[in-house]
Image (cartoon, helix red, strand yellow):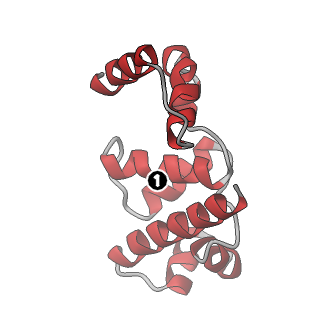
Amino acid sequence: MKGVIGMAKNIFGEFVKTYRLKCGLGLREFCRNYGHDAGNWSKLERGLLNPPEKEEDLTSIGEQIGIKKNSEDWMKFFDLASLTRGKIPKDIFDDDEVLEKLPIFFRTTRGIKPSEEDLRRLVEILKK
């Protein structure tokens, strides 16, 4: 699992860096403008530092780097932040119906053949 989390950190960091660069700001200028420590921000972008856990802190960062709220990239930003910390995204975790089906997904991704009933339920979830 460490390998996946490390990979997620790198993906999250690259995602954040890409958006910062779209703002046309170098690292130091961005950090000066928004009150971030340049050394820690650099670590975040290089995948050496986890993203903040608090949703309001992530929201602030997302806004600062110019991600449009409620866009696909907004969701991706929060999903990557959760995965970086080795956690299931909050909206998934709060949905009992989806959460109940995750073991089917986990078994399938591990190469354990699901039952016909499991496949049927998984297809229903994916259609939603």
Identify which amino acid the numbered label 1 is placed on.
Phe
In the rendered image, the quadrant that contains the N terminus is bottom right
| Frontmost residue, 54 versus 35 | 54
Under circle 1, the secondary element is: helix
Q: Quadrant of residue 47?
A: bottom right
Q: Judge whether 55 appears above or below 23 on screen.
A: above
Which residue is drawn at the image coordinates 34% and 41% (left, top)?
Answer: 70
Going 27% across and 24% down the picture, which residue do you hit? 127
Q: How many marks?
A: 1
> Where does the image place residue 50, in percent across and percent down from the top left?
69, 61
Residue 52's quadrant in the figure?
bottom right
Q: Position of residue 124 (x, y in %)?
A: 33, 18
On the image, numbered disc 1 is attached to which residue? 77
At x 57%, y 76%, the residue is 31
For this rendering, which residue is in front, 15 or 41?
15
Which of 57 and 12 lies nearest the eye of the viewer?
A: 12
Seen from this angle, which residue lies furthest left? Answer: 127
Report crowding for label 1: few under 14, some 14 to 19, many 20 or more residues within 10 A (C-alpha): many
Q: Quadrant of the C terminus?
A: top left
Q: Is residue 85 left or right of residue 16?
A: right
Query: Where is residue 67 shown, x and y percent of the image?
Result: 37, 56
Relative to 66, does residue 81 appear above or below in the rendering? above
